[in-house]
């Protein structure tokens, strides 16, 4: 008959694929459970208020029209809904595909069973498959894995959260409209069960059996699977555990499968006492805590509480006397095994001949150790006992007392056992590899010795006092031939014959009185030794390795092992060489008994998930090394350089993992930045500078200590420092900028976040999400144009009321000292986002409030007709302008605030660019010069291309311009005023609106010879520099003709007022004209445009007179 798993056996291959996929689905569910977006839990009040209307559970399906109409009624809700969709559709799709694969798995399993019943697979029925060893294993696993999937989903993803995610996916995806979508079935299968994994939560009635019956599976199939699991040893594990007291451990995997499968037929658990008694007697006579899948523990006392038959059967196991007996047995076991294993691990004890002579004893010792460790780890695990359940607490206390449980001793035994297992396995692998070579060499040596003895008795070879003896000569020749004829392939016959040969050599020595000749005796003894070695060598079998693999399984501790982390870390701290023993333990954990079809596309994904989890755990344990190191770093900084040689001896570079160092550095620096940059907005004066100075000292401390340590531990300290600090700052900037983005960058999408070296996230303390946001908002608060006045010539901000200095450009040097180039660059990026938001809000106000107000638009129309043509002069100028300003007075306060905010941020961006450029020229003059030249040459090439399109220009797919921009911004080679922040459409009356706005502000300002334009009254604040830069930035976002018209209107205003003054013989230049001319002067200066731009609208003699006024 064809092998069941042969590639041409469709029946076997089909079920093999299903089971293989089952393990992959569980791995994906466990992987995804770490990535549930917190918003779907709706735990925070803020989340409930913000997203309550757009995140619904299955109540949505009762009346989708009601929910959708609620959204449509409010545009802001629609906008939020759209933003939420953009941010979450990717992760929702991933979750949905995982849920869909669970449903598809059970549908495929049912279809396979139907095919078996209908005879699709020739000569195969359910009965014949269950008679085949592989078929029996696979069918049992298929049902068990489906049960595990359902339990994992309920344990790791709460019912309400699942429902909300499925409803969101349903609303946002196109799947609901496709005909082949089985979304309804998935929703039915995965709707909330009412189960909660929180301790103390009440178990829902008929749980989990009602959940398991949502998709009906053939009762015959379930009954037959349970029958097999009850009666057979489906994995043939008992052969690896010959002792009867180890039977429950041998059948532990099967017991876990049976426990899960029993939920498919709860009637056995409820009423069938005889079956339950049989199950408990076979599988649970001495244990009640089991691992159902990769360390997910279940306590049967709690799990079987609602089922009468199961509970009654288990009571015999839970009898106080039985618990005492089992606990005492394992306590004694641990006491006797510890010295035994330590003796075996002594240097040089486990030699090849000892191992080969004592294989059964060594395997028994391994079995006893692993059984004791398994029982004690499972039955004392915190996760297996609900602290709110009195009975469970009592059982746990009894186990701990009677087994004299000491986690440190148990952990030590685990370490020693893993090390012993590791050494034994490695020796066996090597012996297996060399087995045939050694056997052949022993055979050759033995045969040659016999030939030499034959020659000795021929009388030809001179050997002292040996007479010629033809009989012995012939006999020894025959023995040599017999040894030569031994066949390695037929090990049984060869072994039997070897034993006979040894016996013959003993007898020949006695019968022929050969003891008198020592040399002959030596030859015989050597040959016997070689024959003994051949027997030992032929006994090295792969079965021993397989038994060790089965016995050494530690997959049950995949999660429990975490409770030993602190003990591991303490032992590393006390003795760093403990790491070598831990290596063996981690290898032991890594050998889980998961089954994945070798050719399956899921193999890589599943193994990556579990190895990734293990690597993360190893990192967690070994993190103690860099932690201890960083604790010492604080002391290192204070030590004199003269004393540093003492440290060199205490730090062993091999103990330090670079990733661990990075992780600890990130943790500490991120925490220092989070704590150090929290500001009190009410503090007078601001805490900004003192806190920056303090922070700079802290960062310098970290930096200097890193400089010291790099030589001792052989790492590139400066490289690590720059990479990690830049990552922390860039990540925080990214998170802060998320508040300005519709499509947020989630942690798992961020290029700066890492799973191995995670950047911690702290809860926000104010409106900012991170320290960079708090720093930025504090700078904006203290340089607010409503309370301060910026003097451009001095690069300084003064308080409008007290005229005291608030801050100056030293602030940016301080930020450079504290956060470095990355910090300034990040601050600059954040200001860009803020400017964009401010401009967008401003344009919305302009379009919705100002340009929709008919009365205001009429004033603009009237003014436009009054000033046409712009080249001319406005008659009765004062009256025309004053009237227009007076009628539009109410719209300017909001306009002014927005313009000044943009201007203020542009000043800050200019200061940042200056600081970056200065430090770049100072610290890296060659880079600064190279970037400057490259920038100029690129610009001239681009200008040349626009004049002559045949000349080259970077293609669309060329990233040169994009990449060079990042370098230029980091080096401060940029002008923020030339940036285009937003895309705009044509706006009616735009030049006249801005012109009117400007002349409405001029009466609030006065010209001061030493300080330029300043505010007249602190009660009505206007700051000149932010006003000019804000207007300039706003105009820059539109077509240049708008700026042209705006400047022409200002020129016309100056000419008209001057004309009026001349006709009325007013000698002094009016202050408004001075302000308007000042604006033109500053406009030309800031934009670096030629003077003729302004002189095109105002005669040069007016400018000359204006300068005499200055």
Image (cartoon, rainbow, N blue to C red):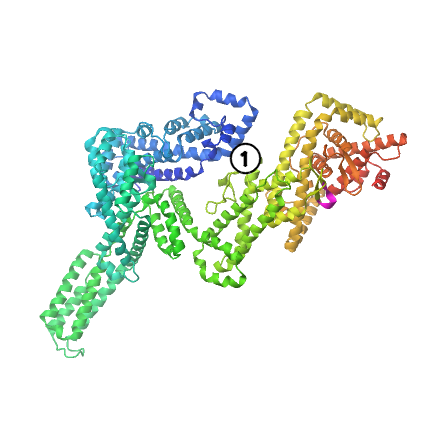
Nearest to the observer: residue 620 or residue 606:
620
Splitting the image into 4 quarters, where does residue 924 fall?
Answer: bottom right
Quadrant containing the C terminus is: top right
Q: Position of residue 1026 (x, y in %)?
A: 70, 38
Splitting the image into 4 quarters, where does residue 485 fall?
Answer: bottom left
- Is 726 in the magenta? no
How dense is the environment of label 1, judged by Cα within 10 Å: few (below 14), some, or many (20 and up)? some
Nearest to the observer: residue 989 or residue 364:
364
Part of the protein shown in magenta: 790-795
Q: Can residue 979 be seen? A: no
Q: Which residue lies under the disc numbered 1?
A: 743
Q: Compared with residue 210, is residue 790 higher up or lower down, i.e. above or below? A: below
SS class, disc 1: loop
Going by the image, does 160 lie left or right of 1006? left
Q: Can residue 224 be seen? A: yes
Q: Compared with residue 890, is residue 929 higher up or lower down, i.e. above or below? A: below
Going by the image, does 718 lie left or right of 284? right
Splitting the image into 4 quarters, where does residue 20 fall?
Answer: top left
Going by the image, does 1046 lie left or right of 37? right
Nearest to the observer: residue 278 or residue 536:
278
Nearest to the observer: residue 906 or residue 20:
906
């Amino acid at each position: 008959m064809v092998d069941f798993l042969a590639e041409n056996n469709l029946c076997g291959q089909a079920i093999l694929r299903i089971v293989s996929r089952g393990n992959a689905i569980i791995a994906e569910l466990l992987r995804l459970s770490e990535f549930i977006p917190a918003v779907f839990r709706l735990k925070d009040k803020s989340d409930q208020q913000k997203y309550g209307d757009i995140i619904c559970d299955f109540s949505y399906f009762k009346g989708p029209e009601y929910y959708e109409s609620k959204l449509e009624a409010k545009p802001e809700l629609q906008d939020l809904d759209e933003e939420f969709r953009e941010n979450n559709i990717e992760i929702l799709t991933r979750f949905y595909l995982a849920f869909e694969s669970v449903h598809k798995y059970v549908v495929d399993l049912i279809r396979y069973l139907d095919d078996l019943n209908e005879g699709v697979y020739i000569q195969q029925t359910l009965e014949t498959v269950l008679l085949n060893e592989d078929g029996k294993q696979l069918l049992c696993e298929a049902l068990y894995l489906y049960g595990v999937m359902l339990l994992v989903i309920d344990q790791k993803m709460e019912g309400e959260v699942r429902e909300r995610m499925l409803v969101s996916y349903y609303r946002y995806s196109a799947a609901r409209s496709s005909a082949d979508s089985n979304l309804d079935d998935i929703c039915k299968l995965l709707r909330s069960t009412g189960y909660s994994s929180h301790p103390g939560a009440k178990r829902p009635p008929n749980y989990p059996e009602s959940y398991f019956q949502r998709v009906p599976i053939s009762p015959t199939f379930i009954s037959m699977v349970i029958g097999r699991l009850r009666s057979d040893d489906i994995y043939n594990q008992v052969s690896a555990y010959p002792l009867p007291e180890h039977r429950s451990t041998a059948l532990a995997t099967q017991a876990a499968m049976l426990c899960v499968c029993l939920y498919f037929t709860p009637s056995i658990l409820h009423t069938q006492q005889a079956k339950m008694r049989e199950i408990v007697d076979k599988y649970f006579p001495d244990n009640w805590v089991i691992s159902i899948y990769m360390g997910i523990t279940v306590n049967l006392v709690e799990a079987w509480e609602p089922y009468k038959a199961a509970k009654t059967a288990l009571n015999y196991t839970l009898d106080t006397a039985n618990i005492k007996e089992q606990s005492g047995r394992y306590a004694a076991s641990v006491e006797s095994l510890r010295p035994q294993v330590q003796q075996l691990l002594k240097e040089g004890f486990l030699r090849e001949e000892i191992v080969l002579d004592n294989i059964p004893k060594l395997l028994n010792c391994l079995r006893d150790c692993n059984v004791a460790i398994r029982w004690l780890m499972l039955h004392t695990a915190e996760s297996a006992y609900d602290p709110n359940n009195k009975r469970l607490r009592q059982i746990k206390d009894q186990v701990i007392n009677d087994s004299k449980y000491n986690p440190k001793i148990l952990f030590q035994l685990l370490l020693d056992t893993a090390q012993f297992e590791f050494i034994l396995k490695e020796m066996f692998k090597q012996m297996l590899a060399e087995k045939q070579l050694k056997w052949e060499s022993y055979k050759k040596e033995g045969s040659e010795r016999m030939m030499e003895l034959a020659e000795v008795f021929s009388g030809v070879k001179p050997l002292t006092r040996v007479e010629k003896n033809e009989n012995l000569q012939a006999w020894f020749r025959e023995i040599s031939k017999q040894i030569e004829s031994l066949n390695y392939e037929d090990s049984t016959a060869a072994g039997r014959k070897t034993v006979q040969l040894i016996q013959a050599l003993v007898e020949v020595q006695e019968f022929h009185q050969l003891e008198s000749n020592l040399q002959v005796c030596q030859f015989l003894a050597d040959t016997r030794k070689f024959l003994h070695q051949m027997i030992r060598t032929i006994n090295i079998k792969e079965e021993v390795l397989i038994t060790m693999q089965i016995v050494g399984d530690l997959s049950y501790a995949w999660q429990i092992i975490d409770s030993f982390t602190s003990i591991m870390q303490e032992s590393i701290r006390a003795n760093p060489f403990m790491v070598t023993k831990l290596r063996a333990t981690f290898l032991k954990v890594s050998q889980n008994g998961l089954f994945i079809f070798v050719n399956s596309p899921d193999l890589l994904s599943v193994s990556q998930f579990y190895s990734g989890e293990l690597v993360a755990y190893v990192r967690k344990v070994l993190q103690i090394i860099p932690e201890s190191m960083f604790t010492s770093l604080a002391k290192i900084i204070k030590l004199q350089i003269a004393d540093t040689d003492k440290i060199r001896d205490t730090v062993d570079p091999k103990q330090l993992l670079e990733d661990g160092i990075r992780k600890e550095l990130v943790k500490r620096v991120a925490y220092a930045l989070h704590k150090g940059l929290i500001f009190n907005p009410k503090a007078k004066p601001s805490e900004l500078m003192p806190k920056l100075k303090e922070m700079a000292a802290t960062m310098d401390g970290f930096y200097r200590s890193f400089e010291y340590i790099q030589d001792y531990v052989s790492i590139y300290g400066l490289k690590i420092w720059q990479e990690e600090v830049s990552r922390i700052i860039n990540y925080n900037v990214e998170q802060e900028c998320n508040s300005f983005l519709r499509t947020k960058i989630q942690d798992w999408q961020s290029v700066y976040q890492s799973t191995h070296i995670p950047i911690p996230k702290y809860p926000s303390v104010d409106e900012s999400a991170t320290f960079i946001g708090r720093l930025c908002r504090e700078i904006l608060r203290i340089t607010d144009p409503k309370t301060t006045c910026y003097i451009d010539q001095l690069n300084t901000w003064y308080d409008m009321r007290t005229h005291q200095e608030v801050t100056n450009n030293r602030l940016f040097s301080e930020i450079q000292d504290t956060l470095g180039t990355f910090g300034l660059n990040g601050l600059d990026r954040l200001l860009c986002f803020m400017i964009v938001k401010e401009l967008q809000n401003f344009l919305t106000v302009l379009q919705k409030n100002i340009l929709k107000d008919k009365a205001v638009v009429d004033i603009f129309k009237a003014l436009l007709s009054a000033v046409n043509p712009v080249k001319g002069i406005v008659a009765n100028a004062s009256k025309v302008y004053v009237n227009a300003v007076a009628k539009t007075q109410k719209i300017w306060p909001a306009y002014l605030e927005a313009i000044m905010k943009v201007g203020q941020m542009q000043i800050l961006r200019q200061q940042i660019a200056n600081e970056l450029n200065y430090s770049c020229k100072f610290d890296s003059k060659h880079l600064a010069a190279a970037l400057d030249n490259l920038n100029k040459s690129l610009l001239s090439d681009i200008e040349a291309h626009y004049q002559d399109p045949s000349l080259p220009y970077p293609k669309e797919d060329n990233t040169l311009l994009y990449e060079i921009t990042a370098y230029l911004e980091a080096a401060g080679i940029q002008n923020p005023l030339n940036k285009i922040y937003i895309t705009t459409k044509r706006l009616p009356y735009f030049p006249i609106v801005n012109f009117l706005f400007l002349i409405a502000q001029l009466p609030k300002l006065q010209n001061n010879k030493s300080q330029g334009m300043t505010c007249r009254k602190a009660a009505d604040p206007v700051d000149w520099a932010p006003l000019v830069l804000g207007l300039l930035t706003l105009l820059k976002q539109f077509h240049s003709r708008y700026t042209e018209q705006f400047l022409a209107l200002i020129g016309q205003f100056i000419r008209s007022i001057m004309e009026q003054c001349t006709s009325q013989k007013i000698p002094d230049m009016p202050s408004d004209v001075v302000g308007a001319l000042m604006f033109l002067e500053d406009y030309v200066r800031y934009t670096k445009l030629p003077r003729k731009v302004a002189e095109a609208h105002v005669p040069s003699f007016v400018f000359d007179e204006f300068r005499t006024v200055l």
